[in-house]
Amino acid sequence: MIWFDIVTPKDVLFFKPIIEYLKQKKKEILITARESDDYKEVVKLLELYKIDFINRGKFGGAKLYDKLRASLERQKALMEFISLYDVRCLVSLCSVDANRVAFGLGIPIINFYDIPLSDYSANFKKALPQARLTLPLSTIVFKPFVVPDEIFLRFSLEKDQIFEYKFIDPVIWLKDFKPDFNYVKKILEPYKIDFSKPLIIIREEEYKSSYVEKKYPFLYEALPDIYKKFEPNIVIVPRYESDYLKKEFPFAIVLEEKIVIQHLLAYADLFIGGGGTMNTEACFFGTPTISTRSFISHYDKFQIDNELMWWVNSKEELINLVKKLLGKRYDEKANKIFSKMEVNLKKIVDEILNT
């Protein structure tokens, strides 16, 4: 039995084709997840894609003490649960709790990771907590071509433990995706928006994550000015709670239902994102993309260098870029760059099964 621990929305999307491929090969799959009152995005996405899972443990929130307590409690719950099964290996995107349990129980660990540092150099002062707590425990690690081997070697891995793939992570689920504008209209129809106006999608930074220092305010401060200056339809995809967003931005649509967001990203006139996954998805579709993330990762840098994404860290820069980019498209450039990337599911699955 192959165990997947899925703890972020990206995990769902990234592992979905791998899980489907394994099931085609008649392999038994066990999937665990987590949720909390203020963090249900993962579970909603698993349910949207009809992926069977079992919840064990909760998300710890923003405070370090709460994170640690939730992590320890979840490790105990996972330990007791996983011990009931004959698990041959763990597959994860560096899930700390699952890595610790698998290591303690002698289960081989296969990690995928595209963001070992909150930086695009090799400054290990910027190593993410998740990377420090998981990568050294790995039996093998998969990484995208944009992250140098050197970084993973410094996490106490040997060269033969590192496997490179020739794509940026979201390509694994986007390569066969077909955007549908009718889906966009259906989702936004209840909000009675004017489709003659530009559509701007907003995604918050994952400010409760351990790798983000704090909640940076400039995106939130800029939104009223963006609405006033450009009169767009603004759709906010919340990261955590949504009630405060509705109160603070009554002019915006706060999208609470879990949908196939890629359709909206493909047809947006502009995407402003504080994370990584949706930023790359928007870039993939050629939608002009502004990153408000508090750092630049290796794959961020790749997209910035290829002029598919722009990075800002102030309200003034953000508003100026909105004016410059709103309504432009980069479809041809995006297709030229992303079409060169190769997703070899067979090779990935074979390595998993050989571990």
Image (cartoon, rainbow, N blue to C red):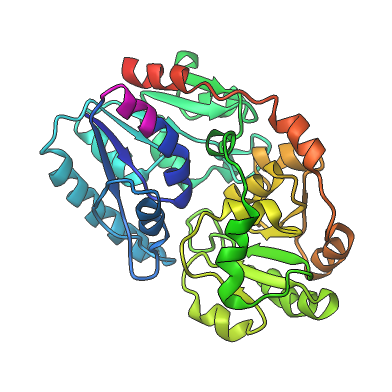
Magenta extent: 19-26
Query: Which of 149 and 182 lies nearest the eye of the viewer?
Result: 182
Q: Tell whether 28 sits left or right of 170.
A: left
- Residue 301 sits in which quadrant? top right
- Residue 197: x and y, percent? 78, 71
Any part of residue 215 in sight: no
The stretch drawn in magenta includes residue 25:
yes
**Towards the viewer: 342 or 49:** 49
Q: Quadrant of the C terminus?
A: top left
Identity of the residue drawn at 31% across and 55% down: 34
Indicate the quadrant where residue 1 lies.
top left
Number of residue marks? 0
Farthest front residue in view: 182
Residue at the far left: name it. 84
In this view, 314 is above or below 80: below
The answer to whether 280 appears left or right of 82 in the picture is: right
Give x and y (percent) for residue 268.
71, 58
The residue under the point 51% across, 64% down is 239
The residue located at (68%, 36%) in the rendering is 121
Quarter of the image for residue 264 reads: bottom right
**Point 44% across, 18% down: residue:** 346
Q: Is residue 233 left or right of residue 324?
A: left
Judge from the rendering whether residue 28 lies leftward or rightward of residue 235; answer left or right: left
Query: Where residue 196 appears, x then y in whole percent?
Result: 79, 69
Where does the image place residue 184, in percent across and percent down from the top left? 61, 60
Q: Tell me if I can see residue 11 in this picture.
A: yes
Frontmost residue, 286 versus 5: 286
Is residue 140 found inside the magenta-colored segment of the image?
A: no
Helix, strand or loop for the magenta stretch, by majority: helix
